[in-house]
Image (cartoon, rainbow, N blue to C red):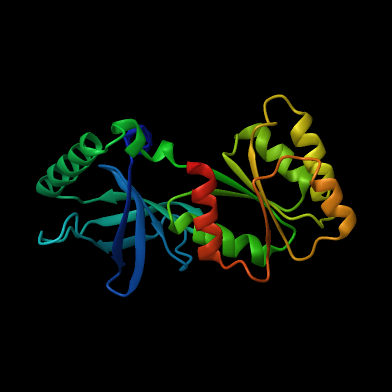
């Protein structure tokens, strides 16, 4: 328990490095600390499972091959692991790699830390659509959260403020139009960027949405995950 608490306090560096799991499954480390990493993988390794990792910190260097324990699972996205049985030499290599990359970041150490990742809230009643967007956003370095309707989205925002919302319009319980009405009248939420991403938009919905400030309206049928991520980046950087 003490080791786990210590690991949570460690600075986690944003990275994107290929990781080989159990000499068979390829994943990508999206952040790394001296004590562990988060690995993007579609394989559902259970919590507590011991796995063997192999990854390099830089081209030309010998790979690190620590054993790790799965600490938590983010379904459909990946796993957070804690390194165990790591040699002192590899611990020093990890520490030096993290320190050097934090200092070298053009916007300073804070911008390189995992807590600087932009948070995206996906509001869509389709589990398949949410999973597709979430996987792509996570792989590209974003923190992606989910809600199946507007009411769930409001509850999610009360816990964590998103930087951008991907919003479907036609949903049960609370649709996208009603959600936008609440969003834009809430003092702490009114400036959150929104991309409307819907299968079809009726003329009545289009008229209502035009009354709100949205960053873009994209059709689901022709907007690929790659195009969506690129548009998200453009809006957040603009």
Q: Nearer the viewer, residue 151 or 213?
A: 213
Furthest toward the top, the residue is 187
Q: Is residue 75 visible?
A: no
Which quarter shows the N terminus? Answer: top left
**Residue 22 drawn at (x, y percent):** 30, 69
- Looking at the image, is 181 positioned above or below residue 58? above
Q: Nearer the viewer, residue 215 or 118?
A: 215
- Looking at the image, is 106 positioned above or below residue 71? above
Q: In screen coordinates, is 217 left or right of 145? A: right
**Residue 180 drawn at (x, y percent):** 78, 41
Furthest toward the right, the residue is 204
Picture residue at 25% right of the left edge, 42% below the top: 34
**Residue 54 drawn at (x, y percent):** 23, 63
Q: In screen coordinates, is 7 left or right of 40? A: left
**Residue 76 drawn at (x, y percent):** 54, 62
Q: In screen coordinates, is 36 left or right of 232? A: left
Picture residue at 72% right of the left edge, 40% below the top: 213
Number of marks in the rendered image? 0
Task: Tell me which corner region of the image, top left, top right, bottom left or bottom right, holds residue 117.
Answer: top left
Q: Is residue 122 visible?
A: yes
- Looking at the image, is 91 positioned above or below residue 231? above
């Amino acid at each position: 328990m003490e080791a786990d608490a210590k690991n949570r306090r460690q600075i986690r560096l944003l990275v994107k490095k290929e990781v080989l799991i159990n000499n068979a499954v390829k994943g990508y480390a999206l952040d790394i600390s001296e004590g562990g990493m988060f690995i993007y993988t579609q394989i559902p390794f259970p919590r507590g499972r011991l796995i063997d990792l192999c990854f390099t910190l830089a081209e030309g260097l010998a790979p690190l091959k620590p054993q790790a324990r799965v600490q938590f699972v983010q379904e459909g996205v990946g796993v957070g692991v804690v390194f165990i049985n790591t040699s002192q030499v590899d611990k020093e290599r990890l520490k030096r790699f993290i320190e050097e990359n934090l200092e070298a970041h053009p916007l300073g150490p804070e911008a390189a830390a995992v807590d600087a990742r932009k948070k995206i809230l996906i509001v869509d009643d389709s589990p398949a659509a949410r999973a597709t967007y979430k996987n792509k956003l996570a792989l590209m370095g974003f923190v992606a959260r989910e809600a199946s309707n507007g009411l769930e989205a409001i509850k999610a925002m009360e816990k964590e403020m998103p930087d951008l919302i991907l919003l479907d319009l036609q949903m049960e319980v609370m649709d996208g139009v009603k959600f936008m009405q609440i969003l834009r009248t809430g003092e702490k939420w009114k400036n959150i960027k929104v991309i409307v991403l819907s299968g079809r938009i009726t003329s009545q919905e289009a008229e209502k949405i035009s009354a709100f400030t949205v960053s873009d309206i994209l059709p689901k049928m022709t907007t690929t995950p790659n195009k969506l991520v690129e548009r998200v980046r453009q809006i957040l950087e603009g």
